[in-house]
């Protein structure tokens, strides 16, 4: 049974930081690139960041580049998202997922419950 459990969200003031975690199970973690996505109220889910299988390659949405850092610990089957210099427009529910194939942004399977990030101005 595949499970994705996101945690670490909360309420933070603009300019603050949060570190999100995503514990993944049910698939061989190292077989997959991993990605973070977010969904703001009234908007579609959007890509935030992705990381290669070994952790040496990363890619970010322009809106979070130079502020967010994705990383992974393959021994713990966990992917992280360090978010610095947070802005009110970063307010959203954040989700992680396994990514399909060697390129692209297509998630594999169902989503977890996500973790709420709220940034106050």
Image (cartoon, rainbow, N blue to C red):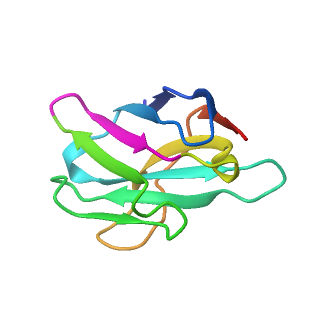
Extreme residue in the right direction: 42
Query: In which quadrant is the C terminus drawn?
Result: top right
Quadrant of residue 119 in the image?
top right
Would you say residue 77 sits in the magenta stretch? Answer: yes
Which residue is rendered at x = 45% and y = 44% of the image? 84
Q: Nearer the viewer, residue 109 or 77?
A: 77
Give percent across and percent down for residue 93.
65, 40
Which residue is rendered at x = 28% and y = 46% of the image? 71
- Counting every numbered tag in the picture gives 0
Which residue is rendered at x = 21% and y = 55% of the image? 53
Q: Is any atom of residue 2 visible in this view?
A: no
- Residue 54 appears left or right of 88: left
Give percent across and percent down for residue 20.
44, 34
Would you say residue 13 sits in the magenta stretch? Answer: no
- Residue 79 appears left or right of 39: left
Give percent across and percent down for residue 30.
20, 46
Q: Is any atom of residue 6 visible in this view?
A: yes
Vertically, is 94 above or below 1? Answer: below
User: What span is colored magenta in the figure?
Assistant: 75-85
Q: Nearer the viewer, residue 112 or 64?
A: 64
């Amino acid at each position: 049974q595949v499970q994705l459990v996101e945690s670490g969200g909360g309420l933070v003031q603009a300019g603050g930081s949060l570190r999100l975690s995503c514990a993944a199970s049910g698939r061989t973690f190292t077989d997959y690139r991993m990605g973070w996505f977010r969904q703001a109220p009234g908007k579609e889910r959007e890509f935030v960041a992705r990381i290669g299988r070994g952790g040496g390659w990363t890619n970010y949405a322009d809106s979070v580049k130079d502020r967010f850092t994705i990383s992974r610990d393959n021994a713990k089957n966990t992917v992280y998202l360090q978010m610095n210099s947070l802005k009110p427009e970063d307010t959203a529910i954040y989700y992680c997922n396994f990514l399909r194939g060697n390129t692209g942004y297509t998630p594999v399977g169902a989503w977890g419950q996500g973790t709420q990030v709220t940034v106050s101005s």
